[in-house]
Amino acid sequence: MPLAYPVIKPIRCVGWVPAHDASGRQWQAPFLAELLADPYAAVRFNAHRSLRQLPGFSNFAYDYVGMLAAREQARKQARKQWEELSAMPLEQTGRHVLITSDDRFQQDRLTHIIRQRDDRPIRIAE
């Protein structure tokens, strides 16, 4: 059965300073980068806002309602920027953050998780 992820609240927590203090910050960038290409605009908005709070991303330009190609390019640029910045040791590594002890992001595991997500549009009548 596909998973439906309530992603907006966790993304807001990723941008929350006490959460940074508890878990570190550097490991979060590749996840937030992936969400820059999310099908939902609210998720993209919150991912960008959280990404800009991370070291090295304060000036990261992005239009969460821009064209798909531009959003995909921003996702790739954010990942590249994280890889360049991650030359310094990360505070968190391991299976729980999908980053190996040699600081390699486990894209295949994240792709597997994302493929389980139910992205069907949700319409709420008000």
Image: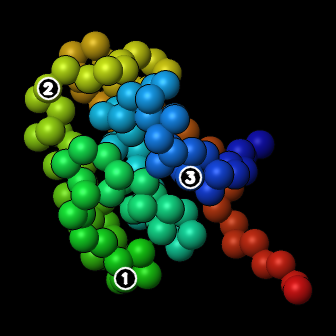
Label 2 to label 1, Cα distance in Å?
32 Å
Quadrant of the rendering where the C terminus is positioned: bottom right
The answer to whether any part of residue 115 appears in the image is: no
Residue at numbered disc 2:
88
Discs 1/3, front: 3
The mark nearer the N terminus, 3 or 2, is 3
Residue at numbered disc 1:
66
Q: Residue at x 40, y 16 (%)?
A: 94
* Amino acid type assigned to the residue bearing label 3 in the image: Arg
- Give whichever of 108, 76 is nearer the camera: 76
Q: Is residue 43 above or below residue 65?
A: above
The mark nearer the N terminus, 1 or 3, is 3
Label 1 to label 3, Cα distance in Å?
21 Å
- Left or right: where 94 falls relative to 100: right
- Left or right: where 47 falls relative to 125: left
- Left or right: where 51 falls relative to 6: left
Q: Is residue 126 above or below residue 58?
A: below
* Amino acid type assigned to the residue bearing label 2 in the image: Met
